[in-house]
């Protein structure tokens, strides 16, 4: 029965996610299977969790579960209809040389190892006390969050203000297997870890026009110590790596749209934006930065006021969740004081210690090895080779979050604000790691023209493969 429940849960989740992807990718005659399913894993989780949350205002129990399942089937059917209407073909790019075959084998082995390790480890602190506990409360309350959860002082440590992307995706698994179960809930994080590394490899290959660079970039992830072994790494069930992957999807699709002038990438960018504030509280900051980066690169296309409506879904998620927290009377975060100019002025003496601690974290070998040194070197190298807007977009998308992350510690409520910073900063930097990997990969672009902006649209069939045909 558990096996049947898992099959139903993942089938409906991927049906919704792949249906969304089919609608976003319309115009491409060939879909890369790896990309299609990997994107579907994230969009499916977002769709299921949002419908569970919104539907919970009206129904609960089996009726809610059935309603979400029907919505997933409808989205999947719409996607299948688009696939049939455009006569889409599916492909899986195969290695073209012994060297690529070797790299592909190494990456596949590494991904299999991640799956084994992830399923063999218990969930970490945040996974258990921020995400799983919400899923269990909702399961015991017919699929909706109990109102007294948000007002109970005893639940303050579980961060009631965090959004419900992850716990309600876990809840979807629990509803289908009939009980909360940590082991089966971990399969969600395992799926996202594999999907994230695949997408990083794909985007690196497309951006550089070199398939071997894409494969090496996927393998390179496993040499970042904190990403693999740290609290919050891809095997611990934390939200930071999935959040980093969604941020990567948004920024990478912006850059790919710039270089290929393909509107499919633009649609994926706008679709990924609302997922950022729905996944974690810091996602709201990343949403602001991703929107600003989009305005930087799309300024010529945003002359029509109606075009700004594409940013509205993310704003609706932000406003809707904030209003929900206010209505249910959720207590504010206990980690930070009120973020006012007066508080900032009182803590001006913290600026230098915070900056020092931040730099020391970046060069900490047991956490990052040489990762951030390589990111800085890649940025310097690209500054002299690439167009200004390309380098500017990368710099803004990486540096602006770092500045914002440092700034929030000016409002720490911990008695030792530096201890607060040391405890959480590595996980915040983890959210930028996938994009940093992409910047390092861009150094190895196949030609000077590879990252140059295009005025015409490339053949969609080429864009659908791991590496454009030559």
Image (cartoon, rainbow, N blue to C red):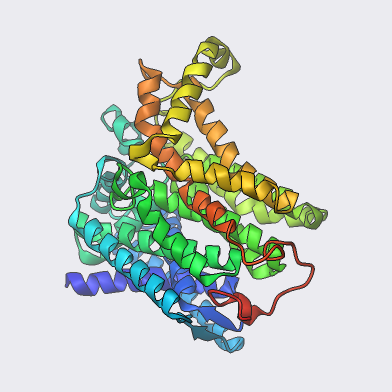
Q: Position of residue 179 (x, y in %)?
A: 19, 59
How many marks are shown on the rendered structure? 0
Return the residue nearer the eye: 428 or 78. 428
Could you say which quadrant of the image residue 1 lies in? Answer: bottom left
Instruction: Classify 352 as above or below 124.
Output: above
Residue 438 horizontal side relative to residue 382, left or right: left
Residue 133 horizontal side relative to residue 337, left or right: left
Q: Residue, x 53% and y 74% (percent of image)?
A: 466
Q: Residue, x 30% and y 31% (percent of image)?
A: 157
Q: Residue, x 45% and y 58% (percent of image)?
A: 46
Q: Residue, x 45% and y 74% (percent of image)?
A: 34
Instruction: Classify 280 as above or below 38.
Output: above
Quadrant, the C terminus = bottom right
Q: Position of residue 147 (x, y in %)?
A: 34, 40
Could you say which quadrant of the image residue 215 lies in? Answer: bottom left
Residue 320 horizontal side relative to residue 165, left or right: right
Q: Position of residue 94 (x, y in %)?
A: 45, 82
Return the residue nearer the eye: 445 or 20. 445
Could you say which quadrant of the image residue 330 lies in? Answer: top left
Return the residue nearer the eye: 380 or 116. 380
Instruction: Classify 328 as above or below 144.
Output: above
């Amino acid at each position: 029965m558990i096996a049947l429940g898992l099959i139903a849960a993942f089938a409906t989740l991927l049906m919704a996610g792949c249906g969304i992807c089919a609608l976003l990718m319309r115009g491409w005659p060939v879909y890369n299977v790896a990309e299609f399913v990997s994107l579907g894993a994230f969009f499916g989780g977002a769709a299921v969790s949002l419908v569970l949350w919104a539907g919970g205002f009206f129904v609960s129990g089996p009726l809610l579960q059935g309603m979400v399942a029907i919505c997933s089937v409808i989205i999947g059917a719409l996607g299948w209809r688009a696939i049939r209407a455009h006569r889409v073909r599916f492909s899986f790019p195969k290695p073209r040389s012994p060297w690529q075959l070797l790299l592909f084998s190494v990456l596949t082995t590494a991904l299999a190892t991640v799956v084994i390790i992830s399923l063999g480890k218990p969930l970490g602190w945040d996974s258990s006390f921020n995400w799983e506990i919400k899923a269990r409360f909702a399961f015991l309350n017919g699929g909706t969050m109990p109102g007294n959860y948000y007002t109970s002082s005893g639940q303050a440590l579980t961060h009631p203000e965090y959004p419900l992307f992850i716990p309600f995706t876990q809840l979807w698994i629990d509803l289908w297997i009939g009980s909360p179960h940590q082991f089966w809930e971990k399969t969600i994080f395992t799926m996202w870890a594999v999907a994230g590394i695949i997408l990083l490899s794909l985007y690196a290959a497309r951006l550089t026009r070199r398939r071997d660079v894409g494969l090496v970039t996927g393998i390179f992830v496993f040499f970042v110590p904190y990403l693999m072994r740290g609290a919050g790494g891809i095997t611990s069930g934390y939200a930071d790596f999935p959040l980093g992957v969604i941020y990567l999807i948004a920024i990478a699709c912006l850059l790919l749209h710039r270089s290929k002038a393909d509107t499919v990438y633009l649609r994926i960018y706008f679709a990924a934006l609302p997922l950022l504030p729905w996944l974690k509280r810091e996602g709201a900051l990343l949403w602001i930065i991703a929107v600003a980066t989009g305005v930087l690169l799309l300024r010529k296309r945003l002359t029509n006021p109606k075009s700004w409506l594409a940013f509205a879904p993310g704003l609706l998620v932000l406003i809707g969740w904030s209003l929900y927290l206010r209505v249910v009377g959720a207590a504010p975060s206990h980690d930070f004081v009120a973020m006012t100019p007066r508080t900032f002025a009182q803590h001006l003496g913290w600026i230098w210690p915070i900056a020092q601690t931040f730099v020391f974290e970046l060069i900490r070998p047991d956490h990052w090895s040489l990762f951030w040194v390589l990111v800085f070197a890649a940025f310097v190298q690209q500054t002299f080779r690439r167009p200004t807007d390309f380098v500017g977009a990368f710099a803004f998308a990486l540096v602006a979050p770092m500045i914002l992350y440092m700034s929030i510690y000016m409002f720490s409520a911990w008695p030792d604000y530096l201890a607060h910073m040391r405890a959480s900063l590595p996980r915040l930097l983890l959210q930028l790691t996938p994009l940093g990997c992409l910047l390092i990969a861009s150094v190895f672009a196949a030609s000077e023209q590879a990252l140059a902006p295009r005025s015409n649209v490339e053949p969609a069939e080429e864009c659908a493969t791991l590496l454009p045909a030559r």
